[in-house]
Amino acid sequence: MNIAHPLVSVVDDDESVRESLPDLIKEFGFSVRAFSSAEEFLASDIVDKTKCLILDVSMPGMTGPDLQRELKRRGLPIPIVFITAHRDDTVRPRLLERGAVECLFKPFSDAALQEALSSALSEP
Amino acid sequence: MEMDLGRVFDALPAMVWTAQPDGHFDFANRRWSDYTGLSLDEAHGWEWQAAVNPDDMPTVLERWRSILATGEPGDLEARVRGFDGQYHWFRVQCSPMRDDAGQIIKWCGVGTDVDDFRRAKETLRRRELDFQLIVDSIPMPVAVTTPSGEVEGLNQLTLDYFGKTFEELKGWKASDVVHPDDLERTIAAQLDAHRKGRTYNVESRHRRADGVYRWHNVLGLPLRDPQGNILRWFHLLVDIDDRKRAEDALSASESYARSIVDSIPGMIAAFTPNGELEFVNRQIIEFFGKPLEELKRWATSDMTHPEDLPRAVEYFTRSIASGEPFTDEVRARRFDGVYRWFQSRGFPLRDTNGRIVRWYNLLIDIDERKRAEEALTARERNLNEIINTIPVLAWSARPDGSTEFFNQHYLHYAGLSIGQSKDWVPTTALSDYWDLTAAVHPDDVDGLTAAWEVILASGKSGEAEARLRRFDGIYRWFLVRANPLCDESGNILKWYGVSIDIDDRKRAEQALRQSERSFKLIIDTIPALAWSARPDGSAEFFSKHYLDYVGLSAEQAQNWGWTVAVHPDDLSGLAATWQAIMTSGKPGEAEARLRRFDGEYRWLLFRANPLRDASGNIVKWYGVNTDIDDRKRAETNLAREKHLLEMIASGSPLRDVLSALCEMVEEAGPGCYCDVHPIDWSGPSIEYSVAPSLPASYTDPIAGLSLNGDALPCAIAVREKAQVVAEDMDTDPRWRDSSVRIHVLEHGLRSVWSTPIYAKNGRILGTLCLYQRQPASPSPQHQSLIAHATHLASIAIERSRTEAALRRSETLLAEGQQLSSTGSFSWRVDTDEIAFSEELCRIFKFDPNAVVTLEQFRARVHPDDMPSLSAQLDRVRAGHGYPGYEIRLRMPDDRVKYLRTFGRVVRHQDGGLECLAAVQDVTERRLADEALSKARSELAHVSRITSLGALTASIAHEVNQPLSGIITNAGTCLRMLAADPPNMDGARETARRTIRDGNRAADVITRLRALFSKRTPSIEPVDLNEAAREVIDLLSSDLQRSRVVLRTAFADGLPLAGGDRVQLQQVIMNLLRNAADAMSGVDDRPRRLLMKTEADEDNHVRLTVQDAGVGLTSEAAERLFEAFYTTKNDGMGIGLSVSRSIIESHNGRLWAASNDGPGATFSFSIPKYSGDEAPAQDISAAGASITSSVQV
């Protein structure tokens, strides 16, 4: 893994997100992988190589928060940037409280994402 | 003469003695007294013993007695005391002297002093010289010969007498010293004596020196050594010429009588009473050529043929002893040596005292006859030999029937040969052994004897059969045939017979007879009427059964006689048929009535079969008649029964059927009256009485009579389930005081037999009564008839009752079909025959009386359903069964009918398929269903509207997703364009995605607009029970599909709730659906669902839905009401959150709890209607409320 291109993983059941977001993140200069579900991500070989996880909140099956809990259980403190199409203000503080780097409401700007990513990757 | 001889003996220089046959000495010569010194008297009797040495006496006596006993010459030795007291050894030789009859008349002995022999053998020669001297000194001519007859010595007297020398006399046999007439006899006597070792005594004439023949008695004595061997012979010539002459003189004195006798042309001999020949006539002398003296010895001579002699002697001596005459046939030897046959007859001559003084013997020459007989015998022998070679059993018999001869085959066959000799057996001997019945089977002896006697009496040829035992003990049948042999004058001379083996034929005959007998036996035993007829059709034979049957004799029945027994009405038909059968030459049959011996005409089946010979010509017809009267009757009964059953089957009124039954019974049982009573069990009582032959006055009172009570025989029969027989109502004590008795008797009836009629299940349907006008009890035929009739009555009554029941049942069915709008049809798949029930015709609007065709049926079917119908019909035709389906009809008025069918396909025994189906007109229900369905869809639509508040969030989500893509893509696009160099391809791609996501967002908006096109809710009083029922009705099919068992427990008098009815129904529907879905995976227990309503505290009304589904985990319970939380794969997860928002908008509460058992319970509680509720909140407010309540 090239240190100049930290790996960012995207987990979202929405296909358009999985199409568009990786391109944008690459533009930011990161390596990127996209998964359609939490289960798919967990099953992949890059869980421990992922430097930042961009994670959808609501997904069939394992939800974003579920995956967050699972990674925490496994002792994998991957910085997580939640993204969600539900603009529920009560949700964001709870997610942040549980350790998320950021929670972005769709649609979000490329700048907000870049900032969240920087923030995530800058964490110790 | 004896005295003379005594002197001679005295002169003999040897001790010579004679003794009587019993051994008594009666003479001893002087030499004896000279030597012993004893007087002659002292030698007499047994006194000579005194001269014998006592030591030798036992031997001497024993020997002497032995000699006496044997009668043969013998010798012995003993010491004899001389006058000087000296004993000398003497050899004593003894010889018997026999008379002509061979009887010993005297014993002669010569005692020879052998003392010297014993002392010195060398003196033998001298003694022989002495012997010569002795011989010489014998004062009579003596010749001594060797045992072989050679002359050894002659004394001087001999030489002197003959005047010849010793040498000359040696050849005396060839000279004339013995008279030529006597020579042969003399020589023969000598030779015979020499051969036999016996003395001889022959009279012959000897020629003296002067040429004169003088009669001499030549006495020959053998001289033996002590061992008994003959040493030499003495021949004493005793001159008897003087005596002979004296005898001749005597003869001359009888010459007169003799001349008479001699003149008889037969041969006559006379004997003394003791059998001594006294005289013979001239013919005898001439015939035999012998003198009387020789003839006297006839018994020991060959004058009689040796074969005949023993018998002749026996007859003679027997007659002499008994005095009875005798007759014999003997061969006598003529002088020339030829034997001729004579009949010899002897008879006694008695004096006045009856004493026999003389025997006469007459000899008649029968030689010619005998020779003729012998010639015949010889011829016969020749014939016999021929016959013996013939390979048949042949025999002959005398005219009197006694058998004479059996040929060799006969003997061999019967094992009757004498001993093992194969020589021919003289026929005369055979007939002594057997007669014709020898070896004949004991059972056949009498028959054969009788037959033989008949043949003999008739004198004509004849034959008989008998079994003859073969040598191995096996009997075989023979035909014994006898033929007489007659002379010219017709007298039977002889019977000739042959016995021919017919055993094989006999056996065949026997077998045939046996077979015929058994055939006849069979024919007569078989209880069939058998007959045979000639080719022209005339009857030949009738079996015993036939004759017995028609009561005709065989003679009466013969030819066409049997036709008298044929029923006049049937005769012409039978004759025609018989003629047709004969013309056809093939087996055939006919039916006709034949009068039985008792006058009764009975139906018989005549069957005839032709018997053909080898060339195919009919030689005989055989026939059997079978009594088919019972069958005919049965046929009649059957026809009647058939008629009866047809009546039953065609549904004739029961009374008519029973009436016909009664008539049938009465016809089959002459003299009977029949009455049938069906029973009405509601009484129980007699329903009515059917008795066509009895007056109404009899039957009418019976109808309606109760079966309780003993009065009616029928009642007893029913109660006891048994036949009741009243042989005579008049006297039967059971009805003595009964009105029934009077009723019966009044109608002239006496016997009543009542029998229960049983149904198949054993229930009694009625009774059948038989009456007779005289006392009677049922015969087996009656019983059989009753059994039959009750059976038929049972069928009739049961059938009638079943039909009544069936009619009721049909009516019910038709009613049911009409009420349920259900018709039925049957469809014979192979023939396409269709039968519609009345109701189905009504549904299809077909004419109920017309036959429905498949085409008519198809024409009614809605065109859109034709393909489906065809598929269904094809399935049935293919044997796949009847699935049940729905189909629409388009009626002539264009109205559409919905039909639902159920059915099954039956495969008949003939393999044909039949489809039976019920068809229900479900049009009304279907229309109701459609209305319901419409209502449901409207409700669902409304629910979508009312759920809008809650849906907003999800709508936002739906919209935000494409928006997010648009923005991201747009951002990306800009960055790509801003890069150096700009990533034009990436920018183009992201721009394209931007457009696509924009369109997606627009679509979402379009859908939202549609969602918002409905009305808004309002608060009104709602009967929660009724609202819930409507929901249940809406969902009932879903619930049933889900196999949910729903139970409702709606509280009575439940207060009305205040709220939006549709919204509340949406919540109830949501809860029900959730509950049903929660149980969709439950298969191990009933999917029970309980919905109940109740008044809750605080003026609330509560509705609870309790399921038995998967239940709730604590976490699920916690998050249940979150929007987008779902446990279902296909749910959006907004139902419960929307429901909660609705309930909360009604100021109510919605919650969930786990059950103690499986499943969960959801409840909501809302305030009851008070009339002053605030208008229902805006759904958006409610949605906000829901949103706010969602916990993450």
Image (cartoon, coloured by chain):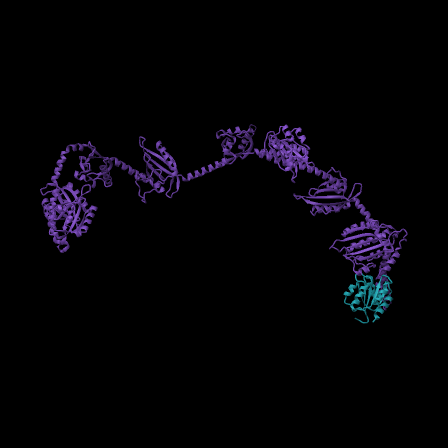
Chain colours: A cyan, B purple
Q: Based on the displayed image, in which of its 4 quarters is residue B644 positioned?
A: top right
Q: Position of residue B600 (x, y in %)?
A: 55, 30
Residue B285 visible from this viewpoint: no
Q: Nearer the viewer, residue B1171 or B403?
A: B1171
| Numbered circles on residues, count | 0
Q: Is residue B23 left or right of residue B449?
A: left
Is residue A62 toward the left or the right of residue B209 in the image? right
x and y percentages locating residue B695 in the rendered image: 65, 28
Where is B1169 relative to A26, above or below?
A: above
The residue closer to the viewer here, B686 or B183, is: B686
Locate the N terminus of chain B by quadrant.
Answer: top left
Q: Residue furthest front?
A: B737
**Closer to us: B704 or B368:** B704
Left/right placement of residue A15 relative to residue B518 reads right
Q: Could you tell me if residue B144 is visible in this image?
A: yes
The percent coordinates of residue B524 (x first, y second) are: 49, 35
Spot occupied by residue B949 in the image (x, y as percentages of width and height): 87, 56
Quarter of image, res B682: top right
